[in-house]
Image: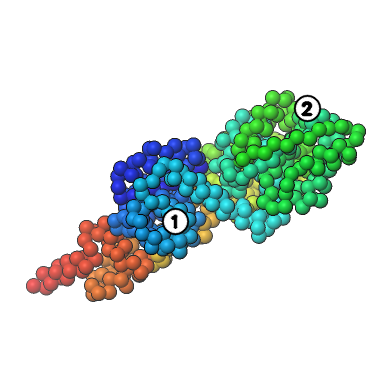
Amino acid sequence: MLRLLIADDEKIIRETMCSIIDWKSLDIEIVGVCKNGLEAYDAILDEYPDIVLTDIRMPKLSGLELIQKITQNHDNIQFIILSGYHDFSYAREAMKYGIKHYILKPCSEQEIIEAVKDSIKEHYKKLPSQAAGQSLPSLGGHLQKNLMYDILLQLLSSDLPAKKLPPLYETYLDFYHTPYHLCYVFFLEESFVSSCISLIQYFFKSHGLDSSFACVYVKNSLLFFFPHPAKGFSDLSGLSGFLSESLTQSPCTFQEEIYDALMPLLETVCRKVKRYETIYLYSGTHPITICNYNYVFQKTLEISDLLAKETDETLHQNLLAELKQLITSIKDLNFLRSLVNSLLLRAMQNFTSLPAAELTNFMMFTASVASNQEICDFLFEKLEILYPAPVISNGKLKPFIQEILDYTNEHIGDCNLTLKWIVENQLFMNVDYVSRQFVLQTGIKFSAYLNELRIKKAKQLLINCDAEKIYSIAEQVGCGNNPQYFSHLFKKYTKMTPKEYIQKMRADKESKNL
């Protein structure tokens, strides 16, 4: 689910946009509703939305100024501008920052919905998994193959509904906007399944298509699916004849369905195959038999989620020991591999922000080892890193929170400083988790802490500053070359403008000298 922030100085417009549109049907969560640009800027630092719907003219910080400040951080945020001013100069200025949607007020509900839908598509185009696929095609294909295999194993061996998957995998896969092909090979005898898969892989390679896909076999029927190739693809009409000619000892028929997105496809696959007692899931030509892994999967994920929240060190160690005992009891090597991949992925979603290539390396390692013990040793080593014991530093703050505070103090003059940047580039952790922990540990949001720190330093610098040099103070405390923003921020926290503060400090000093 993507996150949306709304910023408009007109109350009726803010409330109308929140209530009139069914955001849930668009898979959108509203994470903030702001009445001015300054409030919107702080909310973006704290809530890191995927899409921002903003008015062009607002008090304290305009929509264009807001976009300018945020885009300096190189964040993957899609902006949609609303404006009541029929002046193309605003649209032209917005285009400099890559803004594609400029909607004039009054506008219809449908205009906003269409702009949001386009922004959603643009967001998914920039997913890290697709970037990894462009720069590391072999790793990208391996990652997608393993993720699909893990997704199917979770869905088919547990009661987990398909709609619960996106929060875990959406960093690497698009569930809602990429079209997929679902293919069936009917009347295929079990003894010919591996041969059939090899033939399908050969057909795909000979047509220049990615041959990495997971297959499901139930009751003389083979199912496989793959994302619609972007180029050089028409249809699979030739595959049916190719299989018929090659599998003369097991005559079969071929059928293809096209889905607009991965989510409805997964729901269809689950509905069709989960009614069978025995399901064979293939990674390549090697099957894993799914009978009832429900308890193991559910218990493993349950302990994993508890570990992510546990703050007591003793209970944390007990949960970790229970998880290791459960993993050690698994005898099926293929099932163990997949469960380990799922567990690592879940742990990284909870705590860290690793690139797709590193996740791929994890999966490639688990696929390369030949014994359960090697996989367990590897996993247990990673769990100690990914699920660290909840240690409190100096009886007050967790070490990574203290590191954030120290880094912020040292780089207060950086106008691009955000919690998201610190977390992803210094801590390599999950920003949602760290954001929650920051509030729990310090009692305030990061944006408030950052602003208070900037105002504190500004007060120190303003004591010996001339009113004409306020712009210099703005730069030193991280407000860039925007004295107006600095003035609004300073007044918000002190109830005075910087110039008024200088005058007051001088007056106080003179009164003491009398």
Outermost residue on the left side: it is 514
Describe the element under mark 2 as helix, strand or loop. loop
Where residue 413 appears, as percent x and y from the top left, is: 38, 67
Point 41% across, 45% down: residue: 31
Using the numbered discs, state the Cα–Cα distance from disc 2 to disc 1 in whole angstroms: 52 Å
Q: Is residue 372 above or below residue 506?
A: above
Neighbours of disc 1 within 10 Å: few (<14), some (14-19), many (20+): many
Between 111 and 328, the one nearer to me in the picture: 111
Between 311 and 342, the one nearer to me in the picture: 342
Earlier-in-chain disc, 2 versus 1: 2
Point 21% across, 65% down: residue: 501
Q: In the rendered image, which residue does mark 2 sit on?
A: 219
Q: Is residue 278 visible?
A: yes
Q: In the rendered image, which residue does mark 1 sit on?
A: 419
Where residue 353 appears, as percent x and y from the top left, is: 55, 52
Q: Quadrant of the C terminus?
A: bottom left
- Give the image's coloring scheme: rainbow
Between 231 and 272, the one nearer to me in the picture: 231
Describe the element under mark 1 as helix, strand or loop. helix
Mark 2 in CB contact with mark 1 (< 8 angstroms): no
Q: Is residue 240 above or below residue 514?
A: above
Point 44% across, 56% down: residue: 419
Where residue 193 appears, as percent x and y from the top left, is: 83, 36
Amino acid type of the residue tagged 2 in the rendering: Lys
Location of residue 14 (image quadrant): top left
Amino acid type of the residue tagged 1 in the rendering: Leu
Neighbours of disc 2 within 10 Å: few (<14), some (14-19), many (20+): some
Specify the label residue 227 is tagged with. Answer: none
Where residue 457 appears, as percent x and y from the top left, is: 31, 65
Q: Tell me: 401 left or right of 196.
A: left
Location of residue 494 (image quadrant): bottom left
Q: Is residue 332 visible?
A: no
